[in-house]
Image (spheres, rainbow, N blue to C red):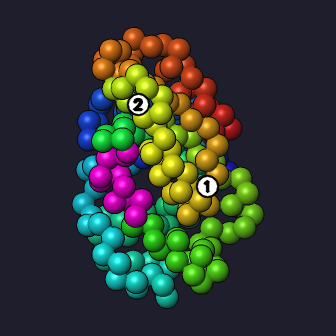
Amino acid sequence: MPKKIIGILGSPLPKGNTAVLLEKALEGARAAGAEVERIDVPSLNFVPCREIFYCTEHETCRIQDDMTEMYQKFRNLDGLIIATPVMTMGIPGKLKSFMDRFQVYYMAKYLRKKPLVPEEKRKSRRCLFISISGMKDPSVFVGAKMTAQAFCRIIDCSYGDEILVPDMDTIQDIRKKPDVLQEAYEKGYALGK
């Protein structure tokens, strides 16, 4: 059975630099034989977590919107690619709200002590984090990485690898960096193998 890899795009630009890197990584995963799916978070219709606490007792959220189908998809994935730009020293708001809605997983794992992902699957799930920033300073990624790492812990998917590209204000078009595109392909391939 092929691995299931989900790529989530946090950028509001579906064909921008972050999306190009995500597509390269998904292309690599597909070449390795994985089944891939891309989810453009900004295009989803959902509301932020309202802390209703329905998920303290249930394996889903009371709010029924585009997030409803995500919970099962994320239970079944073998690998995750998070691709996002850095905005205001963190990840874009819609992506953060997407991650916050996974309180369903948090409550199951930490409150009820019954994680939604089976133990045998938890051991092998990996995440590739891809992020770009206009700034040259590599410390610009600290907040975004911490958020991605926390999300990975909540959904039982090890933060395994990363591609961080600073200075995009100078580079402007990621296609000018074939080495970075190749790195995304290779890391996607490794995730899908």
Instruction: Name which residue lies at 29% across and 36% down.
Output: 14
The structure residue drawn at horizontal position 37% and vertical position 59%, both measured from the top left corner, is 98
Left or right, 40 with respect to 137, comes to: left
- Examine the rendered structure and indicate whether residue 42 appears above or below residue 83: below
State which quarter of the image contains the C terminus: top right
Q: Is residue 68 above or below residue 26?
A: below
Could you say where residue 8 lies in the image, as x and y percent from the top left?
42, 46
Judged left or right of residue 28, residue 8 is left
The local crowd at label 2, few if under 14, some if 14 to 19, many if 20 or more residues have their Cα within 10 Å, is: many
Q: What span is colored magenta in the figure?
A: 90-100
* Residue 179 percent location from the top left of the image: 53, 14
Label 1 amino acid?
A: Cys
**Magenta-highlighted stretch: main secondary structure?**
helix
Q: Where's residue 80, x and y in %?
A: 54, 48
Q: Height in image: 121 above or below 139? A: below
Asked if marks 2 and 1 touch (Cβ < 8 Å), the reply is no
- Whether residue 1 sits left or right of residue 144 in the image: it is right
Determine which residue is flagged by label 2.
132
- At mark 1, the secondary structure is loop
| Pointer 1 residue | 157
Q: Is residue 23 visible?
A: no
Say whether disc 2 or disc 1 marks the residue closer to the N-terminus: 2
At label 2, which amino acid type do we have? Ile
Judge whether residue 97 is colored magenta.
yes
Residue under the image location 26 percent in, 36 percent down: 13
- Give the alpha-carbon distance from disc 2 to disc 1, as whole Å: 22 Å
Callout 1 crowding tier (Cα within 10 Å): few <14, some 14–19, many ≥20:
many
Residue 43 visible? The answer is yes
Q: Residue 173, located in which quarter of the rendered image?
A: top left
Let me know if residue 184 is in the magenta part: no
Residue appearing at x 33%, y 70% in the figure: 49
